[in-house]
Image: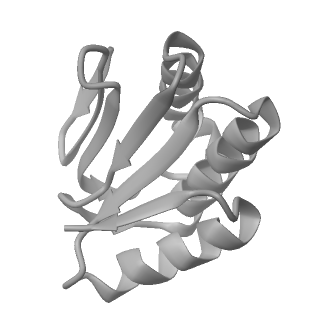
Amino acid sequence: MEINQEGYCVSFNEIKQEITCQGSLMLAGTEEYLPILELLKQASEQVSDSLTLNICNLDFINSSGINTMTKFVILVRNQKTPQLSIHYAAEQAWQMKLVSNLQRLMPDLLAVEQ
């Protein structure tokens, strides 16, 4: 599964059980993020044990995108499976803050600094 638009790409690799977000997510409002949220949901339903969300190459995300990520983390938390891990770039201060906030919502979220 992949959403590849000008400026960003969100894809799910079934073999690696990894969602990768790249580029800049600057969509206008939550409605424009619905296809991405659907991809995230479908990915979480297709894996059994663990799922990785890789945001290392995500350059920017606006508040509507953060809201989408938050909804996804809450969804996975409520499902109880899979074990979610998030890979982030340590040099991106905003990514560290996002991960910290997501861990408040899902304390067993595994954060992996890249």
How many numbered marks, from 0 up?
Answer: 0
**108 or 94, which is in the foreground?**
108
Tell me where residue 99 appears, x and y as whole percent: 49, 71
Measuring 40% from the left and 80% from the top, which residue is drawn there?
Answer: 96
Quarter of the image with the N terminus is top left
Tell me where residue 105 appears, x and y as whole percent: 74, 64
Is the residue 82 above or below the residue 92 in the image? Answer: above
Tell me where residue 30 appears, x and y as whole percent: 64, 46
Q: Is residue 59 left or right of residue 95?
A: left
Measuring 31% from the left and 15% from the top, which residue is drawn there?
Answer: 14
Asked if one can make out residue 2 in the rendered structure from this viewpoint, the answer is: yes
Q: State the colouring used for the structure image.
A: one colour
Q: Is residue 98 left or right of residue 4?
A: right
Q: Is residue 93 left or right of residue 9?
A: right
Is the residue 83 above or below the residue 105 in the image? Answer: above
Measuring 24% from the left and 15% from the top, which residue is drawn there?
Answer: 15
Measuring 19% from the left and 48% from the top, which residue is drawn there?
Answer: 7
Q: Is residue 29 left or right of residue 22?
A: right
**108 or 23, which is in the foreground?**
108
Tell me where residue 98 appears, x and y as whole percent: 50, 74
- Residue sticking out furthest to the right: 78
Quarter of the image with the C terminus is bottom left
Is the residue 30 above or below the residue 13 in the image? Answer: below
Q: Quadrant of residue 45?
A: top right
Asked if one can make out residue 29 in the rendered structure from this viewpoint, the answer is: no
Is the residue 49 above or below the residue 5 in the image? Answer: above
Q: Quadrant of residue 100?
A: bottom right
